[in-house]
């Protein structure tokens, strides 16, 4: 196959919540040896190691990234390595270093080596109290409350700059909370929506760190991967936004999620004890207007609260049952 038709993909943050599943999905689509997983702190799981190449990369070290890009002749990067919102508030300096230096290094390596495309996830965390919280539009005032949000706003602007100044094809979506069964998220504000499932199945009891009536936009992992891949596969002529696209799949309160889980585990009890993450959740949108993504590149999620809950319960129950054997 001629080089120009071949994709050689690097996934940073491949041991994380999104990376651990997206890497496998990309390997299924483009061939296992064409997708290089890279991780830093978390130990890679068996599936990631057995299904293709794995490399250690600290994204704050540019030469680290350049070495791997050259070694595998990479032309596309999914740059997922990041510090999330709650950990970011505990260590803003670390969040800045990993999120900003990391993205800058990726963009510079991509520019210097003439890479074809970069995917980088932004977040609903770019919004703050000056943006409408219901049906938050694509173009709203971006004054976030968290350092994580600050790095996402600055990152969006930097991606757009690399596109207009250097012609680098960077594409991005603003993810809502992501719910998944394979790898737990690490240090975000929307983590309660994942933890609730694990604890409901394991202990029938969960202490939730946001209030019962806290509503946030969310998305199930299959749709999260679909958003990234559909956007990266879309015809360049359709992509008119190189900051980041609003995308969403559902919105629900913590109480509504509890009620949905109770349909499968009737004696599940959830207590609500809000901590510092409540203040973060209160500054984020409750629902998102993603009509621009729908119109420009055909974004369509598949899962709602009911179908996501059913699938999560099935997958986690099966996994826990097997691990007890
Ligand atoms: N899920 C992320 C967080 O809670 C938001 O992008 O930090």
Image: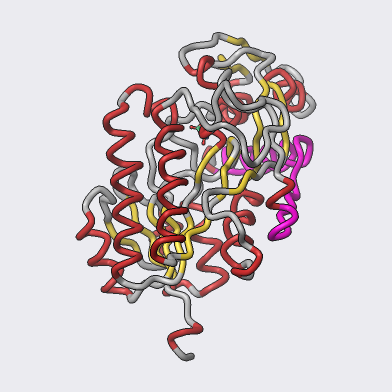
In the image: residue 30, left or right of residue 114: right
Please tell me which residue lies in front, 61 or 143: 143
Residue 101 location, x and y as percent?
Answer: 28, 46
Please give the name of the residue rendered at 35% of the width and 42% of the height, measured from the top-left corner: 99
Residue that appears at 63% across and 69% down: 237
Circle count: 0
As rendered, which of 260 and 220 lies closer to the eye?
A: 220
Which quadrant of the figure has residue 197? top right
At which x and y percent is residue 210?
57, 16
Residue at 23% x, 67% y: name it.
67
Is 43 within the magenta?
no
Q: Which residues are magenta?
A: 294-322
Q: Position of residue 148 (x, y in %)?
A: 42, 32
Quadrant position of the C terminus in the picture:
top right
Q: Main secondary structure of the magenta part?
A: helix
- For the point 56% across and 63% down, the residue is 232
- On whether residue 308 falls in the magenta region, the answer is yes
Of all residues, the one furthest to the bottom in this rendering is 2
Q: Position of residue 79 (x, y in %)?
A: 41, 54
Coloring applied to the structure = secondary structure
Residue at the outermost front position: 165
Q: Is residue 65 above or below residue 196?
A: below
Q: Is 135 above or below relative to 298?
A: above
Looking at the image, residue 325 sits to the left or right of residue 258; the answer is left
In the foreground, 315 or 132: 132
Relative to residue 170, is residue 229 drawn left or right?
right
């Amino acid at each position: 196959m001629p080089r120009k038709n071949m994709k050689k993909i690097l996934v940073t943050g491949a041991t994380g919540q999104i990376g651990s599943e997206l890497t496998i999905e990309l390997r299924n689509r483009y061939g296992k040896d064409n997708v290089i997983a890279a991780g830093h702190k978390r130990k890679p799981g068996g599936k990631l190691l057995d299904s293709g190449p794995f490399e250690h990369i600290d994204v704050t070290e540019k030469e680290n990234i350049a070495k791997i890009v050259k070694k595998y002749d990479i032309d596309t990067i999914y740059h997922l390595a990041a510090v999330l919102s709650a950990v970011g508030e505990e260590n803003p300096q670390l969040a800045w270093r990993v999120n900003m230096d990391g993205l800058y290094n990726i963009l510079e390596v991509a520019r210097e080596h003439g890479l074809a495309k970069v995917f980088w996830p932004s977040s609903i965390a770019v919004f703050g109290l000056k943006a409408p919280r219901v049906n938050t539009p694509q173009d709203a005032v971006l004054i976030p409350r968290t350092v994580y949000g600050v790095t996402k706003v600055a990152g969006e602007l930097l991606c757009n700059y690399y596109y207009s100044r250097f012609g680098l094809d960077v594409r991005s979506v603003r993810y809502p909370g992501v719910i998944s069964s394979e790898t737990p998220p690490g240090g975000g504000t929307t983590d309660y929506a994942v933890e609730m499932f694990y604890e409901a199945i394991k202990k029938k009891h969960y202490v939730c760190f946001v209030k019962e009536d806290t509503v946030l936009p969310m998305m199930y992992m299959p749709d999260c991967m679909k958003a990234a891949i559909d956007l990266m596969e879309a015809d360049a002529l359709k992509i008119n936004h190189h900051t980041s696209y609003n995308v969403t799949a559902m919105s629900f309160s913590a109480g509504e999620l509890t009620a949905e889980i109770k349909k499968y585990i009737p004696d599940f009890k959830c207590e609500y004890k809000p901590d510092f993450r409540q203040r973060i959740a209160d500054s984020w949108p409750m629902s998102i207007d993603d009509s621009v993504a729908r119109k420009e590149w055909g974004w369509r999620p598949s899962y709602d609260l009911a179908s996501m809950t059913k699938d999560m319960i099935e997958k986690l129950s099966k996994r826990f049952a097997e691990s007890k054997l």
